[in-house]
Amino acid sequence: MFGKKITSDAISPRRSKRNAPMSNAPPLRLPGPLDPALLDVDARAAVQALVREGDSANTRQSYQSAMRYWMGWYRLRYGEPLVAPLPPAVIVQFVVDHAQHQGKHGLTTEMPAALDAELVAQGLKGRLGPPALATLLHRLSVIGKLHTSRDLPNPCAQPAVRELLAKTRRAYAKRGVRTAKKDALTREPLRALLATCDDSLRGKRDRALLLFAWASGGRRRSEVVRATCENVRRTGPDQYVYTLAWSKTNQQGVDLPENDKPVTGAAGVALTDWLTSAGITQGAIFRRVRRGGHVGEALTEAAVRDIVRARCALAGLEGDFSAHSLRAGFVTEAARQQVPLAETMTMTGHTSVATVIGYFRRADMQRSRAADLMGDDTEGTEGTGGTASAN
């Protein structure tokens, strides 16, 4: 028994003509073998599709804009199309063309005036002159990413280039140039915005949007436009939970308890009012309101920004506001009201403690007793008739 030879027929499933499936389709053929060292055309296309889907619309747009600028500048500067990999000398030239340095007559760059004017004429930049430091650094980051994504040596990572960038940042800092930050919409200015929202359909939408974005933890505009009737579930009268399955800080979509963001209080009331008035029961929550009160398609991220700016203008607020002002305002208000750091980060989704602590420290300085040691005492502040020091 144990000496019987086992053949392949003995372990293969037997097929009978009775059980054989009947089909007129041609038999499937295995594809030819692939080269393990190379990706074929279809695989490369699939990779690009996954990368596009994984990036946000804002990321794609900013990347494409930066690359258009790079290609335009390179062609005008070198008289030929941009082809990677670029030598480090090109990166250095890009930096000195765009970063200001001290010259004989003040701050200047190495960008020729005619080339600068041509970049404006081609629509690659909005105005003459050097860009903000943040714009320059972003464009350098994009060209570096282009190289690393193609497994090419990154010229921006060369020691000489990194040293130049470090000194450039330091030079700008010594001049008092800081990275521009949007003003924060804390509780009081937010109330001013809400006061501009009437009982029209558009007014109800904007009130619900502002409160939803602010009260649920300072949601980013990308997160606001992805709110749907399917991921915002009702848990009670005027109470909702927004399940944020994907965000900037959770791009892998990991299922975490802090993904659930409560929408309650005034935000819950406003959301119920908007959904009921607009008759929205499925799909996107925040939508365009056309003339005549017709509810249209989902809002875009740009539309959220425009709504915030328009309401700030109606409220007469002075400052530089955008959709991010809602997020900054929530964190700043939480700091002012001394909400524990951990609770604030759970709501906002911040993963960097240092970022949130920055808001908390600014709020603490506004409450600091050390900032007002003189109090209301004005004694001794008036002149005594003596001669003031020239220094």
Image (cartoon, rainbow, N blue to C red):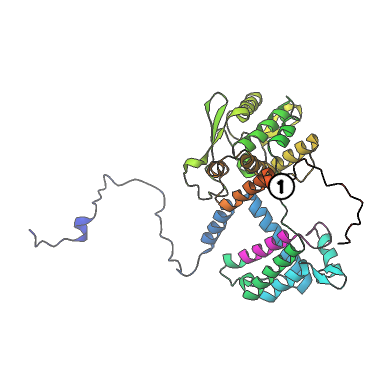
Residue span colored magenta: 122-145
Examine the rendered structure and indicate whether residue 196 appears above or below residue 128. Answer: above
Q: Residue at x 38, y 47 (%)?
A: 23
Q: Quadrant of residue 218?
A: top right
- Decide if residue 114 is on the left or right side of residue 312: right
- Decide if residue 188 is on the left or right side of residue 24: right
Label 1 environment density (alpha carbons within 10 Å; few <14, some 14–19, many ≥20): few
Examine the rendered structure and indicate whether residue 251 appears above or below residue 310. Answer: below
Q: Residue at x 50, y 65 (%)?
A: 39
- Judging by the rendered image, the residue that carries numbered circle 1 is 371
Q: Residue at x 9, y 62 (%)?
A: 3
For the N terminus, the quadrant is bottom left
Q: Position of residue 235 (x, y in %)?
A: 51, 28
Residue in the foreground of this view, choosing between 216 and 111: 216
Examine the rendered structure and indicate whether residue 307 appears above or below residue 28. Answer: above
Q: Amino acid at mark 1?
A: Ala
Residue in the foreground of this view, choosing between 202 and 377: 377
Question: Tag 1, which secondary structure?
Answer: helix
**Is residue 135 within the magenta segment?**
yes
Which residue of the protein is positioned furthest toward the left in this rendering?
A: 1
Q: Position of residue 125 (x, y in %)?
A: 79, 59
Q: Residue at x 88, y 70 (%)?
A: 105
Q: Position of residue 144 (x, y in %)?
A: 63, 66
